[in-house]
Image (cartoon, rainbow, N blue to C red):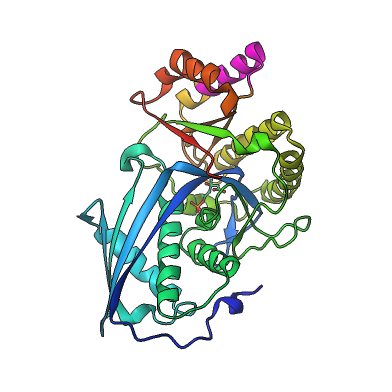
């Protein structure tokens, strides 16, 4: 499929006003997208787990209007900055939703996780927004198959924030062209196209909030620093290889080997930041202290616990549900002291 496939051919109904709603979860990448070109096209393919407890709920009230305008409320508080960003975003997708500038919008949004937690809300936020817009488009007469509806939502979410395109699906989602995996595309994400071994469906994700608040360097800046980065081409090749391997391991049920690649991916992401020009470091001393404890614990107890990191200092602990008791005591006794305010989010994969 190409971008042209997302340009609708229908004539839309003349509806004066209405309301649409959507909920979308955040996701955590296992093989990371890091580096982009043009309009949020990924330099390498990625795969993620969509979470259950970390989500955004959005409702959009729309009213036919001669002047296109956008108001945004986060937890009922008006947000001028978000409104300006969404105003620009809406105009940027007019080609795919031609009615978009014929209305004025009042957007109410809330996240299940605290704003200060350092958990990025852009994936769940743009995911929920794109799903709302698809609901609106269908109210106005666009007719789509379920697969196309999700693809278009994913395509629109990507234009807002790259990784948001994976949040449209439950479970595992792949975004980015991979020569080994059929139907993959740089334009939108697809659901994992193979059988998933049972252990991969019961994965818990406990997020340790090591550093709350916003990060010093945004992901957009980080992606751009991959242009001209001395290790970029090796990194992109490795991500392709890791994605193929991870897909095989998810089918064969090899959680241990999968965990090793996932940890390597997380450390590589941060290594890319540290070796960018200019360099920067988002992990904190306590992130390293936790990693050290995890490796020691795994060595001593044989626990099936692995970690990943997003573009920040927080740590995602990934483990099968059957080890919940063991890992919960480990977190309580050895890890919680490294979090900023004793804060963590108990999440799990959404299937
Ligand atoms: O979608 P962005 O621009 O916020 O970038 C996300 C980058 C990572 O979270 C670090 C990796 C990923 O694939 O989600």
As for residue 291 lying within the magenta part, the answer is yes
Task: Give the residue at x 44% y 16%.
Answer: 332
Give x and y (percent) for residue 228.
62, 54
Name the image quarter holding residue 187: bottom right
Between 315 and 150, which is closer to the camera in this rendering? 150
Task: Give the residue at x 40% y 17%.
Answer: 337
Give x and y (percent) for residue 117.
36, 37
Total number of numbered discs in the rendering = 0
Give x and y (percent) for residue 203.
58, 34
Quadrant assignment for the C terminus: top right
Give x and y (percent) for residue 44.
66, 54
Between 333 and 10, which is closer to the camera in this rendering? 10
In screen coordinates, is 191 left or right of 207? right
Q: Main secondary structure of the magenta part?
A: helix
As for residue 85 lying within the magenta part, the answer is no
Image: 222 above or below 61: above
In the image, which residues are magenta?
290-303
Image: 135 above or below 32: below
Question: Outermost residue, left direction?
Answer: 77
In screen coordinates, is 80 left or right of 278? left
Task: Give the residue at x 52% y 24%.
Answer: 288
Task: Give the residue at x 36% y 53%.
Answer: 57
């Amino acid at each position: 499929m190409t971008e042209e496939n997302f340009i609708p051919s229908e004539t839309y109904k003349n509806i004066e006003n209405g309301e649409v709603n959507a909920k979308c979860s955040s996701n955590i990448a296992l093989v990371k997208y890091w580096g982009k070109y043009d309009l949020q096209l990924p330099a390498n393919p990625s795969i993620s787990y969509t979470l259950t407890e970390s989500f955004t709920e959005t409702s959009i009230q729309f009213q036919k209007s001669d002047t296109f305008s956008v108001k945004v409320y986060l937890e009922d508080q008006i947000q001028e900055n978000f409104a300006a960003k969404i105003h620009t975003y809406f105009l940027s997708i007019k080609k795919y939703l031609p009615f978009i500038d014929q209305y004025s919008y009042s957007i109410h949004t809330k996240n299940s996780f605290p704003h200060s937690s350092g958990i990025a809300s852009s994936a769940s936020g743009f995911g929920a927004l794109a799903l709302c817009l698809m609901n609106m488009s269908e109210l106005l007469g666009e007719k789509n198959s379920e697969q196309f509806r999700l693809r278009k939502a994913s395509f629109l979410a990507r234009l807002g924030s790259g990784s948001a395109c994976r949040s449209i699906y439950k479970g595992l989602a792949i975004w980015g062209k991979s020569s080994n995996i059929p139907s993959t595309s740089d334009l939108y994400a697809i659901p994992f196209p193979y059988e998933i071994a049972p252990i991969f469906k019961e994965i818990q994700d406990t997020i340790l909030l090591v550093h709350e608040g916003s990060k010093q360097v945004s992901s957009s800046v980080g992606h751009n620093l991959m242009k001209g980065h001395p290790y970029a081409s090796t990194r992109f090749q490795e991500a392709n290889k890791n994605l193929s391997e991870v897909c095989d391991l998810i089918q064969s049920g090899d959680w241990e080997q999968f965990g090793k690649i996932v940890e390597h991916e997380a450390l590589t992401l941060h290594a890319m930041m540290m070796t960018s020009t200019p360099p920067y470091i988002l992990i904190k001393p306590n992130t390293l202290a936790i990693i050290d404890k995890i490796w020691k614990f795994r060595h001593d107890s044989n626990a099936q616990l692995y970690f990943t990191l997003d573009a920040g200092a927080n740590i995602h602990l990934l483990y099968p549900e059957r080890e919940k008791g063991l890992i919960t005591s480990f977190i309580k006794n050895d890890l919680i002291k490294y979090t900023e305010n004793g804060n963590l989010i108990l999440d799990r994969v959404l299937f």
